Structures are given as structure tokens and as C-alpha cells.
Image: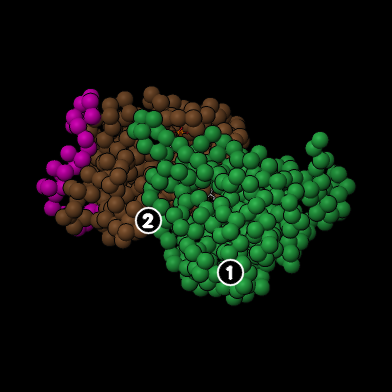
Chain colours: A brown, B green
């Protein structure tokens, strides 16, 4: 079973227009892995008609709860933020294929851009459980989007690099600049595994800077979706073999080298 | 107890609710969400002779109470369909209607013949109404002469019940419907999507890469209902109604307009258990209104003045 009426536990604006929603759904928590996503019906109505896809931000096994971190951008998310504690939310999940954490690596490099950070927290928690070293490259437009105290991440043992487009924190510019420098000087790529989630231009540039690197990268993609389960064939991404793959059922996680991210 | 059984030519369904082509994959994808054997029938995604990747991206977009799609009949091709997809449905206790399309008369006939030979195929639905392909599709479904030719060619190669799926994108749907019936169709299903478009005013690009696309969902329901009514005025062959059905009340409207069964399309995306809710809602309605057989409702609307 993959459709649940989940009780909303809490709903909080953690930074301007970025909300964190917590729901009680022990079955989804139990079945899920980092990188999988949820397909949410924001209300029982035909407006808006379609569900909205969101990554799983964090899970809490003991309480059977999970969190979604989302940016309010349009009709659906504006309705979503008004769901109150105690209300139920109709959720399909967990859907798609998550990140592969079984590879032969001891250090994980994570590149997150904008709301691409959302599923990365679940990924980080899973990697730390597996005793992996984690290096996080986190790029945002402005420091306001860094919704938690970075020191907390460092205390957990993460190495954190931040880039802001407006220069309000860390490197001024795109996160791919410090990443590129790091990769040029780093010697142990064979024991590293890369993970990335963010807007297509960031992933496109990641494809360019990692072209001749020995490191293996997995990326989580976004696409407009209707069904979320591989039947409508709407959420395609171009594949290097000339065809398409479905982001919802073949992904959302793909090998960086197999997908074509050019417009 | 009311009898939910309906008969479409020689095809008997345990209830009048099926899932529409292109909105239910190959029948297995929704098994994680409910017991698909509870459906009256499954109609599989249109299959063509050769595999197709479909149209360029983006190819879906949301619109007010509806959605646009231009998938372009992406499918695995008849060979893989017969060897992998149909066998996966062998243990299901529901009817399987195989939806097929070609790009010319010969390919329509050939894919229809191959699909019919498979023992799991309970009926054929001929898609002459896809708005998203250059050849075949609408070119056939909007022309009564072509329709007659392609239906006759399909009829010649199959003994299984033959359902012809019609497009609403015509001046008079009655003409095309009669052409299909006279050429040997056992039943008609309608409607396929309505031709439509959306434009992003900031980028000035169409929402769908190919520009024109097919509109579905609750926004099209009144159009669909009107078409079913028009066709029902012209012919006695069974009509399968679809287009924008979101709840059991919508399904009852289609029966009253002249349909003997319905298909659920876009609703599957919105609520995977939607089709089941439609089935139980119809059942409850029939009991409450002391209807002994659901087929009594077909065409039972009080005639307009
Ligand atoms: C697998 C996946 C995981 C995602 N995870 C997150 C997450 O964790 N946090 C987060 O903030 N956002 C996430 N998104 C993006 C999120 O789905 C969109 O921001 C959301 O659908 C916008 O809905 P809206 O009605 O507010 O916006 P509108 O712009 O009004 O939406 C109109 C239509 O476009 C679609 N749409 C708009 N933007 C996107 C987008 N970026 N991706 C896919 N569909 C879109 C909507 O679903 C809707 O059908 C994810 C998308 C995917 C595909
Ligand atoms: C994403 C999508 C894909 C579709 N693919 C097919 C198809 O392959 N063959 C077909 O005959 N109809 C196809 N249709 C049309 C539906 O079967 C149905 O006729 C139409 O969507 C109207 O019903 P609805 O409003 O309930 O969705 C498709 C519709 C959608 C939304
Ligand atoms: S959203 Fe329907 S196939 Fe991916």
C-alpha cells in the first residue's frame, strides 16, 4: 500500500517562504529511503487538480513522523502551508528510487542548490548512520535561506562549504566554483561518492566540471508530474541513449553521466 | 441487490467502471494502491507496432481543473507488450482491453491482429483519436471515410469485441460514429482529449513543447457528456463514456446521457483509489434508487424539450 491519510503534526515557516511540515505516517517512514519522494494532494478539490511532488526532508523512526521542507512558490504550496496540525493530508509514497548508499566509498560529497537541500538532510542522516564522512557544498541565493545554524552540522562531523549568490555568507557566487576548486586539488576521488540535488543549471555545470573525474555522481532530478508512479509518461528526462526516462519511476535519482540536462 | 454487470457486445464486465488508456499504464503500476481485480476492466496504454519514445519535453502541464498532455503515444511496442506486459496480468480477475494504434491502415490492422491473437486480450480498443501524433490518430478519427476504412481493416483481422475510440475534435461526432458502426465496430468509446494549448507569458513559449496538446480532466466533462448524448441519439451500439469523471455522480450522468459503461482517466493521477470509489458510489446509488440492473440507467435521462 502506498496511499495514506497522514495526520499533520506541525507546520512552521523556518525562513522567508520556506516551510517545514511534519506528518505522522509510520508506514511511509518504515518503507522509505533517502532520495525517494512523496506525491501530495494539497486539498480534496479539483483546484488545483494534480498532486505536488516533494522530497522527504527527514524521518523520525521512533515517532513514525517525517518532515517535508518546501518553498512556497505557487497555488499548491500556498494551500499546503495552510494545513493545520490535526488535519489529515493525502500522501502517496514513498515513490521512486532513492540514493544508492551501498557503494564502496568512505567519503560522501553532497552538492545542494536552493531547495535541493531538502532531501539532502535525510541523505546526511543515513550516511552518518553508516559512519561515512560527509562533505556538504550548499549553494543558495542569500544567507536567509540557510535555515539552520551551520555550526550544528559541523558538530555532527560534517565539513560544510557555503556559497551565496549575493555574497551574504561564504563564497560569493555559485556553489560550483568552490566545488570545482576542491575537486581540482582533491586526490582521493576513488574513495568518494558524489550526490547532488538542485536546479538543472547547477547540475548541468556539475556535469561539465566532473567530466574527466574518476568520481561517481548520483543526482536527484525534478520534473513536472501528473501520476508520480510511471503511468502517464509525462515526467521525462532526456537520456544519453537518445530516448527518455521517467523521473518519477526510473528516478528521481540518476547517474549524472546518463542524463542529458541541456534545455 | 442491484446487478452491476454490463454487456458490451459479447464482452461482459462485472461492473461498468474501467480505467482509461494512457492513465493506467500496463495495469501493474497501481497494484501497490488497490486490488485492480475490482475494476470492470483495464484498458492498457496505446500500443503500436514499433516502440515509441514519444514527443519532446515538456509534455504535460496543469490547467484550471484539467491538464494538457502531448505524450505522443510513448509505448514499448507490440513485441514487448505481448511478451512482458500482458502476461503480467494473467492472474488478474478483470477484463483486459488492449488499446492499439497505427500510422496507416496496414499498421492499424497488423497491430490489431497481433494483439487479438493473445489469449489475455479480452477486447480491442482502436485509438483513432490521439491528437498528439502526426500520422494516424486524429487524421483518421476526424474523417468519416478514413474511419470506415481503418475500422473495416481492423474488423477483418479480429473476432474479439472491437471498440472504436472517438475524438471530440470534429464538427459532427455522429458522422464519424456511424462510419465506425457501419464498418463493424461493436462499441464506441468517447471522448479522447480535446485539442488545446497553454502559453507561458514570460518565456512566450507554449507550456507543451509541441504547442498543441490534449486537454483532459474535469474541465472537459460537459463536452464529453454532450458528445455521448449526441452519439446515443444516432446509434444503439454500446457507448463507453469518459472525459473528466471525478466521482460516482459524474459516472451516473454519463449513464443517463446514454453510456453503458465508463472509463476513469485523469482521476487515477489525482486519486489512485478514485475508480474504486466510483464503483462503490454507483452501487450505493443503485440500491438507494431500487435499480435492479445498472444497465437500466443507460439513456434514462428525461428527454429535453
Ligand atoms: C521529485 C521532486 C521532489 C521535489 N522536492 C521538493 C522539496 O523537497 N521541496 C520543495 O520546495 N520543492 C520540491 N519539489 C518542487 C515542487 O514539486 C514544486 O515546487 C511544487 O510542485 C510547486 O507547486 P505550486 O502549486 O506551489 O507551484 P505552481 O507553479 O503553481 O505549480 C504549477 C504546476 O507546476 C508544477 N511545478 C511547478 N514547479 C515545479 C518543480 N520545481 N518541479 C516539479 N513540478 C513543478 C506543479 O506541481 C504544478 O503542477 C520537488 C519536485 C520533484 C519533481
Ligand atoms: C497523460 C495522458 C495520456 C493518454 N494516453 C492515451 C493513449 O495512449 N491512448 C488513448 O486512447 N487515450 C489516451 N489518453 C486519453 C484518455 O484515455 C481519455 O480519453 C481522456 O484523458 C479523457 O478522460 P479523462 O478526462 O477522464 O482523463 C491519455 C490521457 C492522458 C491524460
Ligand atoms: S509523473 Fe506520470 S510517468 Fe512520471
Badge 1: chain ID: B
Q: Quadrant of the N terminus of chain B?
A: bottom right
Residue nearest the observer in this picture, B16 or A202: B16
> Is A187 included in the stretch rendered in magenta?
yes
Q: Which residue is mark 2?
A: A244
Q: Which residues are magenta?
A: A165-193
Which percent across, then down, holds residue A137? Answer: 25, 40
Where residue A149 sits, quadrant-wise, is top left
C-alpha gap between disc 2 and disc 1? 33 Å
Q: Residue placed at 55% from the left, 44% from the top? A: B194
Q: Residue placed at 44% from the left, 54% from the top? A: B134
Helix, strand or loop status at disc 1: helix
Which percent across, then down, holds residue A182? Answer: 15, 44
Give residue B153's mark: 1
Could you tell me if residue A175 is visible in this image?
Answer: yes
> Is B304 included in the stretch rendered in magenta?
no
Position of residue B133 in the picture relative to residue B292 (left or right)? left
For label 1, the crowd category at 10 Å Cα-Cα, with few meaning under 14, some 14 to 19 and many 20 or more, is many
Q: Residue placed at 38% from the left, 24% from the top? A: A16
Helix, strand or loop status at disc 2: strand
Position of residue B95 in the picture relative to residue A119 (left or right)? right
Residue nearest the observer in this picture, A65 or A210: A210
Residue nearest the observer in this picture, B37 or A15: B37
Amino acid at each position: 500500500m502506498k496511499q495514506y491519510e497522514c495526520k499533520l503534526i506541525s507546520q512552521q515557516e523556518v525562513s522567508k517562504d520556506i516551510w517545514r511540515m511534519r506528518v505522522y505516517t509510520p508506514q511511509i517512514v518504515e518503507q522509505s529511503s533517502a532520495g525517494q519522494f512523496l506525491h501530495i494532494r494539497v486539498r480534496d478539490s479539483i483546484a488545483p487538480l494534480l498532486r505536488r511532488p516533494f522530497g522527504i526532508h527527514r524521518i523520525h523512526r521512533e515517532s513514525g513522523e517525517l518532515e517535508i521542507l518546501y518553498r512556497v512558490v505557487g497555488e499548491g504550496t500556498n494551500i499546503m502551508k495552510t494545513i493545520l496540525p490535526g488535519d489529515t493530508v493525502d500522501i502517496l509514497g514513498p515513490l521512486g528510487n532513492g540514493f544508492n548508499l551501498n557503494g564502496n566509498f568512505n567519503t560522501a560529497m553532497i552538492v545542494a542548490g536552493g531547495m535541493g537541500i531538502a532531501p539532502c538532510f535525510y541523505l546526511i542522516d543515513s550516511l552518518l548512520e553508516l559512519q561515512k564522512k560527509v562533505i556538504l557544498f550548499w549553494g543558495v541565493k542569500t544567507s536567509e535561506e540557510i535555515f539552520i545554524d551551520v555550526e550544528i552540522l559541523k558538530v555532527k562531523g560534517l565539513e560544510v562549504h557555503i556559497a551565496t549568490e549575493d555574497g551574504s555568507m561564504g563564497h560569493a557566487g555559485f556553489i560550483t566554483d568552490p566545488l570545482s576548486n576542491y575537486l581540482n586539488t582533491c586526490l582521493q576521488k576513488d574513495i568518494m561518492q558524489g550526490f547532488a540535488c538542485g536546479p538543472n543549471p547547477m547540475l548541468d555545470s556539475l556535469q561539465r566540471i566532473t567530466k574527466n573525474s574518476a568520481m561517481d555522481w548520483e543526482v536527484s532530478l525534478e520534473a513536472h508530474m501528473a501520476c508520480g508512479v510511471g503511468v502517464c509518461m509525462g515526467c521525462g528526462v532526456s537520456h544519453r541513449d537518445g530516448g527518455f526516462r521517467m523521473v518519477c519511476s526510473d528516478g528521481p535519482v540518476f547517474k549524472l553521466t546518463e542524463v542529458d540536462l541541456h534545455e | 441487490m442491484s446487478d452491476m454487470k454490463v454487456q458490451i457486445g459479447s464482452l461482459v464486465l462485472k461492473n461498468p467502471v474501467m480505467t482509461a488508456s494512457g492513465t493506467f499504464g500496463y495495469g501493474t503500476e497501481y497494484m501497490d494502491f488497490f486490488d485492480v481485480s475490482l475494476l470492470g476492466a483495464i484498458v492498457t496504454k496505446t500500443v503500436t507496432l514499433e516502440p515509441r519514445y514519444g514527443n519532446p519535453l515538456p509534455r504535460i502541464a496543469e490547467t484550471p481543473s484539467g491538464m494538457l498532455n502531448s505524450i505522443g503515444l510513448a509505448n514499448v511496442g507490440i513485441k514487448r507488450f505481448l511478451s512482458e506486459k500482458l502476461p503480467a496480468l494473467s492472474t488478474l480477475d478483470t477484463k483486459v482491453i488492449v488499446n492499439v494504434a497505427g500510422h496507416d491502415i496496414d499498421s492499424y490492422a497488423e497491430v490489431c491482429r497481433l494483439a487479438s491473437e493473445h489469449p489475455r486480450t479480452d477486447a480491442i480498443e482502436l485509438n483513432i483519436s490521439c491528437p498528439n501524433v502526426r500520422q494516424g490518430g486524429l487524421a483518421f478519427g476526424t474523417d468519416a471515410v478514413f474511419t470506415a476504412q481503418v475500422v473495416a481493416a481492423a474488423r477483418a483481422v479480429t473476432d474479439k469485441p472491437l471498440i472504436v475510440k472517438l475524438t471530440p475534435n470534429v464538427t459532427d461526432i455522429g458522422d464519424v460514429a456511424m462510419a465506425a458502426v457501419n464498418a463493424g465496430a461493436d462499441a464506441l468509446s468517447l471522448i479522447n482529449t480535446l485539442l488545446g494549448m497553454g502559453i507561458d507569458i514570460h518565456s512566450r513559449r507554449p507550456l507543451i513543447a509541441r504547442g498543441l496538446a490534449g486537454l483532459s480532466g474535469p474541465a472537459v466533462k460537459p463536452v464529453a457528456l454532450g458528445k455521448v448524448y449526441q452519439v446515443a441519439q444516432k446509434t444503439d451500439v454500446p457507448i463507453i463514456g469518459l472525459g473528466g469523471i471525478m466521482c460516482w455522480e459524474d459516472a451516473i450522468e454519463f449513464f443517463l446521457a446514454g453510456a453503458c459503461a465508463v472509463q476513469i482517466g485523469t482521476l487515477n493521477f489525482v486519486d489512485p483509489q478514485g475508480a474504486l470509489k466510483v464503483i462503490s458510489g454507483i452501487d450505493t446509488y443503485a440500491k438507494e434508487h431500487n435499480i435492479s440492473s445498472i444497465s437500466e440507467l443507460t439513456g434514462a435521462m428525461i428527454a429535453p424539450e
